[in-house]
């Protein structure tokens, strides 16, 4: 009975985990381990540590103020909302396309098909849209809880098997990571860009937190914060797990990933099963597909939500048309994503790196706004960040700005 009660107030934190665990983990963390072994473990740890306050402020602001993070942006000034729209509309289609094309490759593997990745992407987007139209938040909440449990268990099993495997022996000498190598720096930026997720993700979580409040009639603050910490810390640990899998299984082989979705997915699954054992195939496949499908589904829900909320914040009278706005923006995300996939997809890895790098470059903007809302007059002094959290926040902001400027300098 107690376990059932705990599951009832878990939700936004797990939805956050489902959105975050995807390209950043399955693709980028695994690639980091495959290319550099454990050399970039520090980057994953630092990124998760320094971004913690910015992600926490999303649900925290909502719990303290009973309004969304976007409403907080509006209190900062209309410019913040318009800037949000500019950045969001400039990134969502590329982000959703990158997520969907990776999921499509794994879906072909999972169902034993050989469909064109763009066609499979269309099917996946359609399935996600139907689930969201029929079930709304409650169905999404329940589905994600199951997926996250399956994902966590299968990933841990895979990591344990890879660590215990006696067949893993270094066979190829690889170049070490170097800050003097521009390609290495560009990959590092792509890795950190979505580690643990893009920095507009706290906006999503604030909206899911509002939905959960309505569902549970204002849950206890400590339960909501525990829900967030379970999702955040669990996500960070899973990132390390995927890096470990890449380092243990792929790093010794010297094999490079294909840039095509179907070939990438086949390589990913095959390398694991060849090294760990063919009997592990279903475990690895379920782990990989559940990872990406959960991300695809939650992002398809989140993007229409934040666009709808942004419009309502600018014009509160539109709150009477919430359902219609959600469906309209769901359609916009669907067709915008397909437009990217049909016209601009030449290389899956390139698309993923572009999307993650773009998220990294706009991260300082969201970091500043997420920090600023916690000092608004409607947040009581009692609830404002501690001195340690303020120091951590400003350290993270300096890190994001400095690294973004350094990246731009290298590109120029």
Image (cartoon, rainbow, N blue to C red):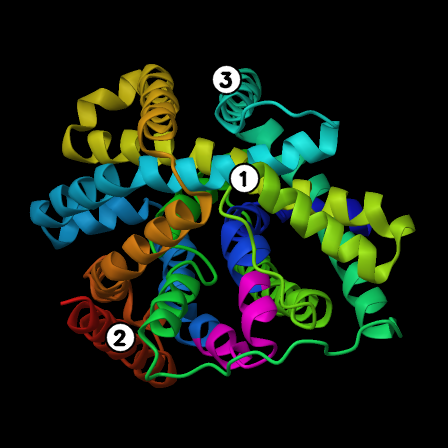
So how many labels did they put on this image?
A: 3
Residue under label 1, please give it: 261
State whether residue 220 is above or below residue 409.
above
Q: Is residue 54 left or right of residue 312?
A: right
- The overriding secondary structure of the stretch rendered in magenta is helix
Q: What element carries label 1?
A: helix
Q: Residue at x 39, y 49 (%)?
A: 350
Residue 192, image quadrant: bottom left
Which residue is pictured at 65% across the width and 25% down the height?
A: 114
Q: At x 53% / y 30%, what residue is drawn?
A: 137
First of labels 3, 2 by sequence position: 3
The residues bearing labels 1 and 3 have C-alpha atoms spaced at a distance of 28 Å
Q: Is residue 18 left or right of residue 363?
A: right
Q: Does the rendering let one see residue 244?
A: yes
Residue 332's disc is none
Query: Upstream in the sequence, badge 1 or badge 2?
Result: 1
Tell whether label 2 touches label 3 (CB within 8 Å). no
Which circle marks residue 403 in the picture?
2
Q: Where is residue 373 in the image (x, y as percent from the top left)?
A: 24, 60
Q: Is residue 348 above or below residue 255?
A: above
Does the segment drawn in magenta span residue 32?
yes
Q: Which residue is drawn at 59% across and 46% down?
A: 264
Q: Label 3: which residue?
A: 133
Q: Distance between the residues labelled 3 and 2?
A: 40 Å
Label 2 neighbourhood size at 10 Å, few (<14), some (14-19), many (20+)?
Answer: some
Q: Is mark 2 on a helix, strand or loop?
A: helix
Between 29 and 46, the one nearer to me in the picture: 29
- Comparing marks 3 and 2, which lies closer to the viewer? 2
* Residue 388 spot, x, y in % from top left: 37, 85
**Residue span colored magenta:** 30-46
- Horizontal and vertical percent position of residue 85: 19, 40
């Amino acid at each position: 009975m107690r376990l059932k009660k705990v599951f009832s107030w878990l939700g936004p934190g797990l939805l956050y985990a489902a959105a975050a665990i995807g390209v950043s983990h399955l693709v980028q963390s695994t690639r980091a381990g495959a290319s550099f072994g454990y050399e970039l473990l520090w980057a994953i740890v630092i990124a998760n540590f320094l971004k913690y306050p910015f992600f926490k402020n999303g649900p925290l602001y909502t719990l303290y103020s009973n309004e969304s993070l976007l409403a907080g942006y509006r209190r900062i000034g209309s410019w913040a909302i318009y800037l949000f729209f500019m950045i969001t509309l400039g990134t969502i289609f590329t982000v959703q396309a990158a997520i969907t094309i990776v999921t499509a490759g794994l879906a072909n593997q999972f169902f034993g098909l050989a469909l064109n990745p763009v066609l499979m992407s269309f099917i996946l987007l359609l399935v996600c849209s139907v689930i969201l139209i029929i079930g709304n938040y409650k169905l999404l909440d329940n589905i994600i809880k199951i997926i996250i449990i399956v994902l966590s268990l299968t990933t841990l099993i895979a990591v344990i098997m890879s660590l215990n495997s006696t067949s893993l022996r270094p066979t190829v000498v690889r170049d070490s990571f170097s800050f003097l190598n521009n390609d290495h720096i560009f990959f590092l930026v792509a890795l950190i860009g979505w580690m643990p997720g893009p920095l507009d993700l706290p906006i999503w979580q604030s909206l899911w937190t509002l939905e959960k409040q309505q569902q549970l009639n204002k849950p206890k603050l400590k339960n909501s914060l525990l829900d967030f910490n379970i999702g955040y810390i669990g996500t960070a640990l899973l990132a390390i797990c995927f890096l470990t899998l890449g380092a243990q299984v792929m790093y010794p082989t010297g094999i490079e990933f294909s840039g095509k979705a179907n070939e990438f997915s086949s390589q990913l699954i095959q390398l694991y099963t060849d090294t760990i054992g063919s009997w592990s195939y279903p475990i690895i496949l379920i782990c990989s597909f559940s990872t990406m499908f959960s991300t695809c589904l939650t992002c398809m829900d989140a993007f229409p939500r934040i666009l709808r909320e942004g419009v309502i914040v600018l014009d509160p009278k539109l709150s009477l048309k919430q359902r219609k706005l959600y469906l309209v923006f769901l359609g916009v995300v669907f067709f915008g994503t397909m437009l990217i996939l049909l016209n601009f997809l030449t290389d899956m890895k390139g698309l993923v790196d572009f999307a993650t790098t773009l998220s990294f470059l706009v991260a300082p903007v969201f970091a500043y706004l997420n920090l600023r809302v916690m000092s608004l007059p409607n947040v009581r002094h009692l609830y404002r960040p501690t001195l340690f959290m303020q120091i951590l926040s400003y350290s993270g902001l300096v890190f994001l700005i400095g690294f973004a400027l350094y990246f731009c300098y290298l590109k120029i």
